[in-house]
Amino acid sequence: MNYYSLTREENERQGVAYSPEEITFKLLYNRRRVEGWKPFSFELRDGEFSDYQANNLGWHLCSGALKKCIERFATGTEGFQWLPVVVQSQGGDAREYFVLHMWPTCDVLNRSRSIFSGDHLVKPVLNAAAIKHLNLFSVSGKGMAYVSEPVRKAARSAQISGLDFLKVPVVAAD
């Protein structure tokens, strides 16, 4: 089966959601379940809403439609939660979004074939045996989200905006 990393679609019409100054990406830096989440509002600037909303924190900000596509294929073993937020346009239109917050549940990398620069993962190569039962997962210590071909097809079929998919190599374990 093919697997893909989620990435933002290059689209000049897509706006960027900005968090309040006191909220930083470090709020979700620890890759584990968040307790006591308090929803807050992002401000959409310089463009339109999209289902996979670009934002200044680099988080996976998903519309209800994208959330539904992902949930359809969840098995319960993935290690993720949805954290509600609001994205409000400068014109006053407010929409509910969800931060896809993930943590690793198993080592999914083929480390001998993946390329690293120090601790930085440059090119992931996935371990087929570790991901065969997963449709959504992340890599230990990294913020990337990976999905299976069925999730990609469902998102394409639902015409999810703002989202692109980069195919990631998958090999058998060494």
Image (cartoon, rainbow, N blue to C red):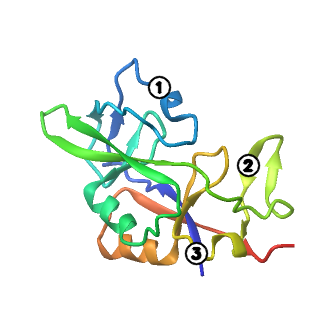
Question: Element under label 3?
Answer: loop
Q: Is residue 27 above or below residue 166?
A: above
Q: Are marks 3 and 2 in contact (CB under 8 Å)?
A: no
Image marks 2 and 1: residues in contact by CB distance under 8 Å = no
User: Which residue has dot 3 on it?
Assistant: 133
Where on the picture, by quarter, is residue 132?
bottom right
Furthest residue toward bottom? 1
Q: Which residue is mark 1?
A: 24
* Amino acid bearing label 2: Leu
In space, the residues marked 3 and 1 are separated at their CA atoms by 33 Å
Looking at the rendered structure, the secondary structure element under dot 2 is: strand
x then y, percent, for residue 117 = 82, 44
**Residue occupying the point 71% across, 75% down:** 129
Amino acid at dot 1: Thr
- Label drawn at residue 169: none
Label 1: few (<14), some (14–19) or many (≥20) C-alpha neighbours in 10 Å: few
Q: Position of residue 56 (x, y in %)?
A: 43, 33
Q: Name which residue type carries label 3.
A: His
* Residue of label 2: 121
Q: Is residue 116 left or right of residue 57?
A: right
Image quarter of residue 32: top right
Disc 3 to disc 2, C-alpha distance: 23 Å
Residue at image coords 49%, 43%: 33
Quadrant assignment, res 152:
bottom left
Q: Nearer the viewer, mark 3 or mark 1?
A: 3
